[in-house]
C-alpha cells in the first residue's frame, strides 16, 4: 500500500506540475519548490520576452526551459531547493 501522507518539508509533484503548466512565466513552480533564483530568472525572461519584435527568443527560451522542468517533474526527477525529491 502506498503512503499518501506528505511529510514536513516535502513538496507535492502534482502541485508543482500544475504551477509549471499554468504559471510557468511567473516561475511559480520554482517559488513553490524553493528555487527562488530560477524563479527570478524566469520572471526576467518573461518580462524581456514582452518586448515587441526583439523579445520572442527570450520567450521561446522560457517556454523550452519550463517544458523541460515540467517533464523532469513528471518523470519523477524533480527536486526541491534542498535537493529532496518531489513526491506524488
Image (cartoon, helix red, strand yellow):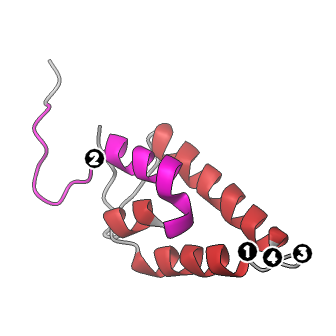
Query: Could you say which is closer to the camera, residue 88 or residue 83?
Result: 88
Q: From the image, tell me which residue sits under label 4.
A: 55
Q: Could you say where residue 13 lies in the image, as x and y percent from the top left?
A: 35, 44
Q: Secondary structure at mark 2?
A: loop
Q: Quadrant of residue 43?
A: bottom right
Q: From the image, tell me which residue sits under label 2.
A: 12
Marks 2 and 4 sit apart, C-alpha to C-alpha, by 33 Å
Residue at horizontal 13 percent and vertical 44 percent from the top: 6
- Compare marks 2 and 4 and give the one earlier in the sequence: 2
Query: Could you say which is closer to the camera, residue 82 or residue 58?
Result: 58
Left or right side of 74 for 51: right
Q: Is residue 12 magenta?
A: yes
Q: Quadrant of residue 35?
A: bottom left
- Compare marks 1 and 4 and give the one earlier in the sequence: 1
Q: Could you say where residue 66 lies in the image, as x and y percent from the top left?
A: 60, 57
- Compare marks 1 and 2 and give the one earlier in the sequence: 2
Q: Main secondary structure of the magenta part?
A: helix
Label 1 or label 2, whichever lies nearer to me, is 1
Q: Is there CB contact under 8 Å for labels 2 and 4?
A: no
Q: From the image, tell me which residue sits under label 3.
A: 53
The quadrant the N terminus occupies is top left
Q: From the image, tell me which residue sits under label 1.
A: 49
Q: Secondary structure at mark 4?
A: loop
Marks 1 and 2 sit apart, C-alpha to C-alpha, by 29 Å
Amino acid at each position: 500500500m502506498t503512503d499518501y501522507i506528505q511529510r514536513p518539508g516535502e513538496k507535492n509533484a502534482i502541485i508543482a506540475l500544475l504551477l509549471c503548466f499554468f504559471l510557468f512565466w511567473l516561475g511559480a513552480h520554482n517559488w513553490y519548490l524553493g528555487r527562488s533564483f530560477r524563479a527570478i530568472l524566469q520572471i526576467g525572461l518573461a518580462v524581456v520576452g514582452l518586448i515587441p519584435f526583439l523579445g520572442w527568443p527570450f520567450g521561446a527560451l522560457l517556454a523550452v526551459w519550463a517544458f523541460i522542468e515540467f517533464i523532469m517533474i513528471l518523470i519523477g526527477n524533480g527536486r526541491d531547493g534542498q535537493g529532496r525529491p518531489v513526491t506524488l
